[in-house]
Image (cartoon, grey):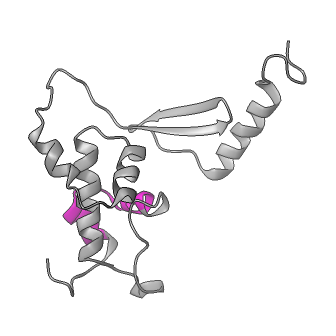
Amino acid sequence: MEAEARYGIEELASLGGVSRRTVRYYVQEGLLPAPLGLGRGRHYDANHLERLLRVKALQERGLSLDEVRRDLERGDGRDVAAELSMAPASPRVNRSAWTRLEILPGVELHLSGRHRLPSPRRLEELAEWCRTHLRPEGGPGGE
């Protein structure tokens, strides 16, 4: 990869084999650094592509996003993706991507990759409903 490479979000997503939405999500989640530049000049470089490919490789080997994040934060130079690629994958295991959202302490929403995440406003409405109707046992209003 050349150091001067500059990619728009569409090109980065295509090279990484993901959607633009996934690129934005990974940036939001801190798995990818924010794009360089401002406004219409925002772009990604070879480091973004390398990181995106690493995230994707780790996910394809069955790591959750939290596990991927820990691997990226560790930064010890170990190539976990290469190590995992040597491990035999079990064809009998059905894998699917899930997103886990903690609505309130002790209340989680799990969405398969086939479902879109609700908007932040809708999530706040859901959290408010949960605060009202799902009180802990023995707590205020609990049985």
Provide residue 66's location: percent of width, then percent of height: 43, 45
Indicate yes or no whether the magenta region holds residue 123: no
The quadrant of the image that shows the C terminus is top right
Q: Which residues are magenta?
A: 10-26
User: Can you name the residue that lies furthest to the right here?
Assistant: 140
Q: Main secondary structure of the magenta part?
A: helix
The count of marks equals 0
Dividing the picture into quarters, in which one does residue 136 lie?
Answer: top right
Task: Identify the residue at horizontal 76%, vertical 33% (top origin).
Answer: 129
86 above or below 20? above
Task: Identify the residue at horizontal 65%, vertical 30% (top origin).
Answer: 107
64 above or below 137? below
Closest to the observer, 54 or 5: 54
The quadrant of the image that shows the N terminus is bottom left
Indicate yes or no whether the magenta region holds residue 23: yes
Provide residue 139's location: percent of width, then percent of height: 85, 22
Provide residue 67's location: percent of width, then percent of height: 38, 44
